[in-house]
Amino acid sequence: MQINRLFEIVYILMDKKTITAKALAERFEVSTRTIYRDVETLSCAGIPVYMSKGKGGGISLLPDFVLNKTVLTDEEKEEILASLKAVSAVHLSETDTALKKLSCLFGESNTDWIEVDFSSWANIQNETETFHTVKSAILEKKMIRFSYANVKGESSNREVEPLKLCFKGGAWYLFGFCRLKQGERFFKLRRIRKLEVLEDYFIRKSPSQIFLEDTSFHEEFVTLKLRLSQKVAFRVYDEFDSYEEQKDGSFIAEIHYPKGEWIFYYVTSFGEHAEVLGPIDVRNDVKTKLQNTLKQYF
Protein backbone atom coordinates (compact mmCIF):
# COMPACT_ATOMS: atom_id res chain seq x y z
CA MET A 1 0.00 0.00 0.00
CA GLN A 2 1.20 3.51 -0.76
CA ILE A 3 0.72 4.80 2.80
CA ASN A 4 3.00 2.07 4.17
CA ARG A 5 5.60 2.79 1.49
CA LEU A 6 5.47 6.53 2.24
CA PHE A 7 5.99 5.93 5.96
CA GLU A 8 8.93 3.62 5.34
CA ILE A 9 10.49 6.07 2.89
CA VAL A 10 10.42 8.73 5.62
CA TYR A 11 12.03 6.35 8.10
CA ILE A 12 14.73 5.35 5.58
CA LEU A 13 15.51 9.01 4.89
CA MET A 14 15.75 9.73 8.61
CA ASP A 15 18.06 6.76 9.06
CA LYS A 16 20.22 6.99 5.91
CA LYS A 17 20.01 10.76 5.34
CA THR A 18 20.28 10.43 1.54
CA ILE A 19 19.28 7.67 -0.88
CA THR A 20 18.78 7.48 -4.63
CA ALA A 21 15.41 7.02 -6.29
CA LYS A 22 16.78 3.91 -7.99
CA ALA A 23 17.69 2.32 -4.65
CA LEU A 24 14.23 3.05 -3.28
CA ALA A 25 12.59 1.68 -6.41
CA GLU A 26 14.55 -1.58 -6.11
CA ARG A 27 13.71 -1.87 -2.41
CA PHE A 28 9.95 -1.48 -2.95
CA GLU A 29 9.91 -3.19 -6.36
CA VAL A 30 8.32 -0.21 -8.09
CA SER A 31 9.43 2.14 -10.85
CA THR A 32 11.54 5.23 -10.23
CA ARG A 33 8.61 7.27 -11.58
CA THR A 34 6.49 5.90 -8.71
CA ILE A 35 9.18 6.98 -6.23
CA TYR A 36 9.18 10.48 -7.73
CA ARG A 37 5.40 10.64 -7.27
CA ASP A 38 5.83 9.47 -3.66
CA VAL A 39 8.34 12.25 -3.06
CA GLU A 40 5.89 14.77 -4.46
CA THR A 41 3.11 13.37 -2.24
CA LEU A 42 5.30 13.69 0.83
CA SER A 43 6.27 17.21 -0.08
CA CYS A 44 2.60 18.19 -0.51
CA ALA A 45 1.89 16.68 2.92
CA GLY A 46 4.39 19.05 4.53
CA ILE A 47 7.33 16.65 4.84
CA PRO A 48 10.51 18.65 3.97
CA VAL A 49 11.85 16.18 1.42
CA TYR A 50 14.01 17.37 -1.47
CA MET A 51 16.11 15.97 -4.33
CA SER A 52 19.66 16.86 -5.32
CA LYS A 53 21.60 15.99 -8.49
CA GLY A 54 25.19 15.03 -9.09
CA LYS A 55 27.63 12.76 -7.25
CA GLY A 56 26.38 11.96 -3.77
CA GLY A 57 22.97 13.34 -4.62
CA GLY A 58 19.60 11.75 -4.17
CA ILE A 59 16.51 12.11 -2.04
CA SER A 60 16.94 13.68 1.41
CA LEU A 61 15.13 15.33 4.29
CA LEU A 62 15.99 18.73 5.68
CA PRO A 63 18.49 18.43 8.57
CA ASP A 64 17.07 18.01 12.11
CA PHE A 65 13.62 16.97 10.85
CA VAL A 66 11.68 14.77 13.22
CA LEU A 67 8.25 13.22 12.77
CA ASN A 68 6.60 15.05 15.64
CA LYS A 69 3.02 15.15 14.41
CA THR A 70 1.82 12.56 16.88
CA VAL A 71 -0.85 12.21 19.55
CA LEU A 72 1.81 11.34 22.14
CA THR A 73 3.02 13.94 24.61
CA ASP A 74 6.72 14.40 25.36
CA GLU A 75 6.22 12.63 28.70
CA GLU A 76 4.52 9.67 27.00
CA LYS A 77 7.34 9.41 24.48
CA GLU A 78 9.92 9.33 27.27
CA GLU A 79 7.95 6.62 29.12
CA ILE A 80 7.74 4.46 25.97
CA LEU A 81 11.46 4.78 25.26
CA ALA A 82 12.38 4.09 28.90
CA SER A 83 10.15 1.01 28.96
CA LEU A 84 11.70 -0.31 25.76
CA LYS A 85 15.16 0.23 27.23
CA ALA A 86 14.18 -1.85 30.23
CA VAL A 87 12.73 -4.64 28.07
CA SER A 88 15.81 -4.60 25.83
CA ALA A 89 17.79 -5.61 28.92
CA VAL A 90 16.86 -9.22 28.13
CA HIS A 91 18.70 -8.87 24.83
CA LEU A 92 15.71 -9.01 22.48
CA SER A 93 16.94 -7.91 19.07
CA GLU A 94 13.42 -7.02 17.94
CA THR A 95 13.09 -4.67 20.91
CA ASP A 96 16.39 -3.01 20.04
CA THR A 97 15.07 -2.42 16.52
CA ALA A 98 11.84 -0.93 17.84
CA LEU A 99 13.80 1.28 20.24
CA LYS A 100 15.98 2.54 17.41
CA LYS A 101 12.99 3.29 15.16
CA LEU A 102 10.94 5.06 17.81
CA SER A 103 13.93 7.07 19.04
CA CYS A 104 14.46 8.20 15.47
CA LEU A 105 10.79 8.99 14.84
CA PHE A 106 10.38 10.82 18.15
CA GLY A 107 13.58 12.76 17.56
CA GLU A 108 14.76 11.78 21.04
CA SER A 109 18.44 11.60 21.84
CA ASN A 110 18.12 11.94 25.63
CA THR A 111 17.52 8.24 26.36
CA ASP A 112 20.76 7.57 28.22
CA TRP A 113 19.38 8.33 31.67
CA ILE A 114 18.35 4.72 32.29
CA GLU A 115 20.22 1.44 31.85
CA VAL A 116 18.85 -1.89 33.05
CA ASP A 117 20.36 -5.35 33.05
CA PHE A 118 18.24 -8.11 34.58
CA SER A 119 20.90 -10.78 34.13
CA SER A 120 23.12 -12.04 36.93
CA TRP A 121 26.89 -11.69 36.98
CA ALA A 122 27.24 -15.42 36.29
CA ASN A 123 25.66 -17.78 33.73
CA ILE A 124 24.40 -14.87 31.66
CA GLN A 125 24.56 -16.80 28.39
CA ASN A 126 22.72 -19.84 29.77
CA GLU A 127 19.90 -17.76 31.24
CA THR A 128 19.54 -15.73 28.04
CA GLU A 129 19.29 -18.90 25.94
CA THR A 130 16.72 -20.35 28.33
CA PHE A 131 14.73 -17.11 28.18
CA HIS A 132 14.57 -17.12 24.37
CA THR A 133 13.72 -20.83 24.16
CA VAL A 134 10.89 -20.48 26.69
CA LYS A 135 9.66 -17.31 24.99
CA SER A 136 9.38 -19.10 21.64
CA ALA A 137 7.56 -22.03 23.24
CA ILE A 138 5.06 -19.65 24.86
CA LEU A 139 4.33 -17.85 21.59
CA GLU A 140 4.02 -21.13 19.65
CA LYS A 141 2.03 -22.78 22.48
CA LYS A 142 4.33 -25.79 22.59
CA MET A 143 5.01 -28.02 25.56
CA ILE A 144 8.49 -27.99 27.10
CA ARG A 145 10.42 -30.58 29.10
CA PHE A 146 13.28 -29.91 31.51
CA SER A 147 15.06 -31.00 34.66
CA TYR A 148 14.35 -28.76 37.66
CA ALA A 149 15.92 -28.40 41.10
CA ASN A 150 13.52 -27.30 43.85
CA VAL A 151 14.36 -25.44 47.07
CA LYS A 152 15.25 -28.74 48.77
CA GLY A 153 17.91 -29.41 46.14
CA GLU A 154 15.87 -32.28 44.67
CA SER A 155 15.85 -32.66 40.88
CA SER A 156 12.88 -33.88 38.89
CA ASN A 157 11.86 -34.05 35.25
CA ARG A 158 8.96 -31.78 34.35
CA GLU A 159 6.66 -31.39 31.37
CA VAL A 160 5.14 -27.94 31.44
CA GLU A 161 2.69 -25.83 29.47
CA PRO A 162 4.65 -22.52 29.42
CA LEU A 163 2.28 -19.59 29.94
CA LYS A 164 4.27 -16.50 30.90
CA LEU A 165 7.75 -15.19 31.72
CA CYS A 166 7.85 -13.13 34.91
CA PHE A 167 10.43 -10.99 36.67
CA LYS A 168 10.09 -10.76 40.46
CA GLY A 169 12.42 -10.49 43.42
CA GLY A 170 15.49 -9.96 41.23
CA ALA A 171 15.04 -13.12 39.17
CA TRP A 172 13.27 -14.44 36.06
CA TYR A 173 10.60 -17.11 36.45
CA LEU A 174 8.54 -19.25 34.12
CA PHE A 175 4.87 -19.47 35.09
CA GLY A 176 3.21 -22.55 33.64
CA PHE A 177 0.99 -25.58 34.17
CA CYS A 178 3.06 -28.52 35.41
CA ARG A 179 1.78 -31.88 34.19
CA LEU A 180 3.65 -33.69 37.00
CA LYS A 181 2.08 -31.65 39.81
CA GLN A 182 -1.17 -31.05 37.90
CA GLY A 183 -1.18 -27.39 38.78
CA GLU A 184 0.23 -23.96 38.00
CA ARG A 185 3.77 -23.41 39.21
CA PHE A 186 6.63 -20.90 39.08
CA PHE A 187 10.03 -22.15 37.88
CA LYS A 188 13.18 -20.10 38.36
CA LEU A 189 14.99 -19.91 35.01
CA ARG A 190 18.41 -20.39 36.61
CA ARG A 191 17.34 -23.78 37.98
CA ILE A 192 16.09 -25.11 34.63
CA ARG A 193 18.39 -27.64 32.97
CA LYS A 194 18.22 -29.86 29.86
CA LEU A 195 15.48 -27.74 28.36
CA GLU A 196 13.78 -28.99 25.18
CA VAL A 197 10.74 -27.87 23.23
CA LEU A 198 8.30 -30.67 22.37
CA GLU A 199 6.10 -31.02 19.32
CA ASP A 200 2.96 -31.25 21.46
CA TYR A 201 0.72 -28.17 21.53
CA PHE A 202 -1.48 -26.90 24.38
CA ILE A 203 -4.54 -24.61 24.46
CA ARG A 204 -4.46 -23.30 28.03
CA LYS A 205 -4.51 -19.50 28.37
CA SER A 206 -2.38 -17.53 30.79
CA PRO A 207 -4.01 -15.36 33.48
CA SER A 208 -3.66 -11.71 32.51
CA GLN A 209 -2.14 -10.61 35.85
CA ILE A 210 -0.77 -13.55 37.79
CA PHE A 211 0.78 -11.56 40.65
CA LEU A 212 -2.59 -9.99 41.45
CA GLU A 213 -4.49 -13.26 41.38
CA ASP A 214 -4.57 -16.20 43.75
CA THR A 215 -1.27 -17.68 42.63
CA SER A 216 1.84 -18.27 44.70
CA PHE A 217 5.28 -19.77 44.47
CA HIS A 218 4.11 -22.84 46.40
CA GLU A 219 7.20 -22.66 48.60
CA GLU A 220 7.36 -22.62 52.39
CA PHE A 221 9.31 -19.69 53.79
CA VAL A 222 11.15 -19.16 57.07
CA THR A 223 12.19 -15.92 58.75
CA LEU A 224 15.97 -15.99 59.06
CA LYS A 225 17.57 -13.90 61.78
CA LEU A 226 21.24 -13.20 61.08
CA ARG A 227 24.11 -11.33 62.69
CA LEU A 228 26.15 -9.76 59.88
CA SER A 229 29.48 -7.99 60.21
CA GLN A 230 30.18 -4.45 59.09
CA LYS A 231 32.23 -5.79 56.17
CA VAL A 232 29.06 -6.96 54.41
CA ALA A 233 27.10 -3.78 55.12
CA PHE A 234 26.60 -3.26 51.37
CA ARG A 235 24.67 -6.55 51.18
CA VAL A 236 22.56 -5.62 54.19
CA TYR A 237 21.50 -2.43 52.41
CA ASP A 238 20.90 -4.32 49.15
CA GLU A 239 19.06 -7.40 50.41
CA PHE A 240 17.34 -6.67 53.72
CA ASP A 241 14.33 -4.53 54.55
CA SER A 242 14.47 -5.28 58.27
CA TYR A 243 17.74 -4.70 60.11
CA GLU A 244 19.23 -2.87 63.10
CA GLU A 245 22.77 -1.56 63.24
CA GLN A 246 24.62 -2.45 66.45
CA LYS A 247 27.10 -0.32 68.42
CA ASP A 248 30.05 -2.34 67.07
CA GLY A 249 28.95 -1.67 63.46
CA SER A 250 27.45 -5.14 62.89
CA PHE A 251 23.82 -5.75 61.96
CA ILE A 252 20.97 -7.90 63.24
CA ALA A 253 18.88 -8.54 60.12
CA GLU A 254 15.82 -10.59 59.19
CA ILE A 255 14.77 -11.95 55.82
CA HIS A 256 12.06 -14.32 54.56
CA TYR A 257 13.74 -17.18 52.70
CA PRO A 258 12.53 -20.48 51.17
CA LYS A 259 13.10 -23.53 53.34
CA GLY A 260 15.55 -26.17 52.19
CA GLU A 261 19.16 -26.58 51.12
CA TRP A 262 19.22 -23.08 49.64
CA ILE A 263 19.35 -21.57 53.15
CA PHE A 264 22.80 -23.08 53.74
CA TYR A 265 24.08 -21.81 50.40
CA TYR A 266 22.70 -18.34 51.12
CA VAL A 267 24.19 -18.09 54.61
CA THR A 268 27.60 -19.35 53.50
CA SER A 269 27.64 -16.79 50.68
CA PHE A 270 28.50 -14.28 53.44
CA GLY A 271 31.55 -16.37 54.39
CA GLU A 272 32.82 -15.72 57.90
CA HIS A 273 30.72 -12.57 58.22
CA ALA A 274 27.36 -14.22 59.04
CA GLU A 275 25.93 -16.04 62.06
CA VAL A 276 22.47 -17.61 62.12
CA LEU A 277 20.62 -16.53 65.26
CA GLY A 278 17.33 -18.20 64.45
CA PRO A 279 15.32 -20.28 64.02
CA ILE A 280 17.31 -22.65 66.21
CA ASP A 281 16.77 -25.66 63.92
CA VAL A 282 18.19 -23.71 60.97
CA ARG A 283 21.15 -22.59 63.11
CA ASN A 284 21.89 -26.20 64.09
CA ASP A 285 21.52 -27.41 60.51
CA VAL A 286 23.95 -24.79 59.18
CA LYS A 287 26.38 -25.59 62.01
CA THR A 288 26.29 -29.34 61.20
CA LYS A 289 26.86 -28.72 57.49
CA LEU A 290 29.80 -26.40 58.23
CA GLN A 291 31.37 -29.02 60.49
CA ASN A 292 30.98 -31.66 57.76
CA THR A 293 32.54 -29.26 55.27
CA LEU A 294 35.54 -28.70 57.54
CA LYS A 295 36.18 -32.46 57.68
CA GLN A 296 37.15 -32.32 54.01
CA TYR A 297 40.12 -30.09 54.93
CA PHE A 298 41.69 -32.43 57.50
Image (spheres, helix red, strand yellow):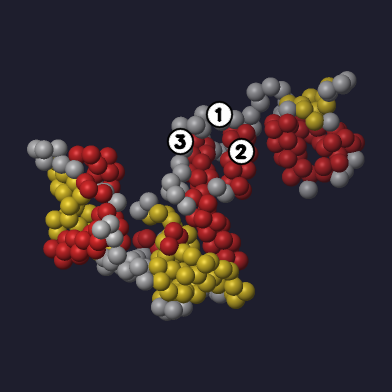
How far apart, in angstroms, are the residues tagged by discs 1 and 3?
13 Å
How far apart, in angstroms, are the residues tagged by discs 3 and 2?
15 Å
Q: Is residue 45 above or below residue 259?
A: above
Residue at mark 3: 114
> Considering the image in quadrants, where does the C terminus appear?
bottom left
Q: Is residue 24 above or below residue 288?
A: above
- Foreground pick, 219 / 7: 219
Residue at mark 2: 100
Q: Amino acid at mark 1?
A: Ser
Q: Amino acid at mark 3?
A: Ile
**Residue 238, image quadrant:** top left
Which residue corresponds to the image point at 49% horizontal and 50% vertical from the top-left? Answer: 124
Which residue corresponds to the image point at 69% horizontal and 22% vertical from the top-left? Answer: 63
Q: Are marks 3 and 2 in contact (CB under 8 Å)?
A: no
Q: Quick one: which residue is furthest to the front in this view?
A: 298
Q: Secondary structure at mark 3?
A: loop
- Answer with mark 1 or mark 3, whichever residue precedes in sequence: 1
Q: Position of residue 234 (x, y in %)?
A: 27, 39
- Answer with mark 3 or mark 2, whichever residue precedes in sequence: 2
Q: Secondary structure at mark 2?
A: helix
Residue at mark 1: 109
Q: Is residue 229 above or below residue 145?
A: above
Q: Amino acid at mark 2?
A: Lys
Which residue corresponds to the image point at 88% horizontal and 20% vertical from the top-left? Answer: 54
The image's mark for residue 175 is none
